[in-house]
Image (cartoon, rainbow, N blue to C red):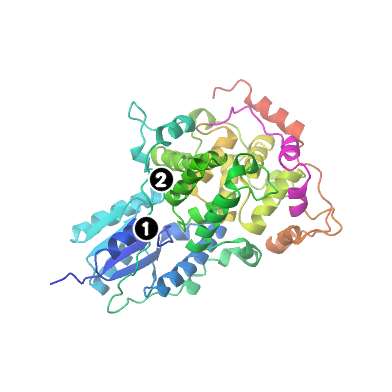
Amino acid sequence: MPQTKPILVWIRRDLRLTDHAALSKAAGMGRPVIPVFIRDHTVDALGAAPKWRLGLGLAVYADRLAAMGSALVLRAGPAREVLERLLDETGADTVYWQRAYDPDSVERDTAVKDALRARGVEAQSFAGHLLFEPWTVETRQGGYYKVYSPYWRAVQHRGVARSLSAPAELSAPHTWPTSERLDDWQLGAQMRRGAAVAAPYQQVGEQAAQDRLASFARDAIADYRDGRNMVATDGCSMLSENLSLGEISPAQCWHAGRRAMQAGKDGAEPWVKELVWRDFAWHLLWHTPHIADRSWRAGWQTFPWNEDERTAEVIAWKRGRTGIPFVDAALREMYVTGRMHNRARMIVASYLTKHLMCHWKIGMDWFEQCLTDWDPASNALGWQWSAGSGPDASPYFRVFNPITQREKFDPDGAYVTRWIAEGQTDPPGTALGYFQAIPKRWAMTPQDAYPDPVVTAEAGRKAALDAYQNRDF
């Protein structure tokens, strides 16, 4: 007799139908498929903005499944317990999922797989949200890569499998298990009034991600080499938002970039290298998980950074009131849109860790609360790279000058004008949106005087270089 027991597909940060190995394998078995998303401790631990954005993505993904006659079952609780209850309720004897690579998820998934197999369940995981799984890229000596450039050279000519087509259909079970209501989860509660401000800037779901990729590959990738640094223009793909939740796969992006390279578009290779930089971040998190919570370079673990978030300098930085327009504009862009231009991220991070001499974890944790494209590996690597404490860092003694950086990458002041209202007679809606998004207790208004610098570019550079003197890094 044909096998009719359902297959559970455990959906995580892979909210798409196309190029989804676990879903494709389940669909090809000719058996009922039950997609399930579990709100466990890894979801509850998310910051305000990424948790809210996850809720938006889940809503769109559930609608996409419903349109093809399927459904997304929502359950809350420890993953092992939820899956075992669903196995009992549905009679399923198979669970598929796509791998995650952060330490918490690896520990959870290993325990789940062992427990399911112990009860005779087929538990199978598939390659997840990377181009190259971390253990598949090794140096000639058999170790991991600590520097990006040789990592890039090691993978740039590797083959990446063609994207899997979306399943034509997903067979439904005779009876669907009960599902919790997404609205009851209140994933956006911590965003409070900021959610309404940031919502128009989100492009949610697989179709939006595909449209974004197509538009970028057609119109902007050729100029990406220079355009990616101009903060007031649309020179970037903006796909980090979608990649963070798996609404598009990195393989789909890789192949689009390769096609553009073959077409002679000059900016295509730098963009593909950014995709590989994302993989490199996960490569490091896998091999050196301490990158997420302490300085990667041992010599920096005793560096006397300020770690007190209650200082006036840190508060001014968080509120976009440092008196340095480039820094403040970038932070305000993040509060209004949920994202920040990558060039601006480097300046914001450098100012906090070098001019203000504050610990990079303060900034990393703040970004985790505020970014809708939050990615744990990229966030950790980016902050440690900027601070000088991480792998493949710029020289630790290089201190970005936020004044000259603005002159170079926002020469006509369009970016600053877009995001800072103070001092403008008729500020744009983007700048005003900041005051609608921030907590009321901050008691800020567009009529406030713009502050003097907390620390000037010159004084901050001198303080940083003085602090670096006579230290063994």
Q: Nearer the viewer, residue 427 or 27?
A: 27
- Mark drawn on residue 131: 2
From the viewer's side, name the closer residue of 344 and 158.
Answer: 158
Give the side of residue 257 with respect to residue 76, left or right.
right
Q: In the figure, 227 relative to 395: above or below?
A: below
Q: Position of residue 243 (x, y in %)?
A: 49, 53
Amino acid type of the residue that numbered disc 2 sits on in the rendered structure: Leu
- Residue 316 makes an appearance in the image: no
Q: Residues within 10 Å of mark 1 (few under 14, many from 20)?
A: many
Residue at image coords 54%, 39%: 270
- Say if 229 sits above or below 84 in the image: above
**Amino acid under label 1?**
His
Residue located farthest toward the left when viewing the structure as drawn: 1
Q: Quadrant of the C terminus?
A: top right
Looking at this rendering, what residue extends furthest in the right direction? 425
Compared across the picture, whether 254 is left or right of 469 comes to left
Measuring 48% from the left and 41% from the top, which residue is drawn there? Answer: 262
The answer to whether residue 138 is visible is: yes
Total label count?
2
Which quadrant holds the N terminus?
Answer: bottom left
Q: Judging from the image, what secondary structure is the residue with disc 1 in?
A: loop
Determine the image quadrant of residue 122.
bottom left
Circles 1 and 2 in contact, beta carbons < 8 Å: no
- Label 2: which secondary element: loop
Q: Alpha-carbon distance for marks 1 and 2?
A: 13 Å
The location of residue 113, given as percent across then percent down, is: 27, 55
Q: Which residues are magenta?
A: 393-418
Residue in front for this viewpoint, 96 or 316: 96
User: Dot 1 corresponds to which residue?
Assistant: 20
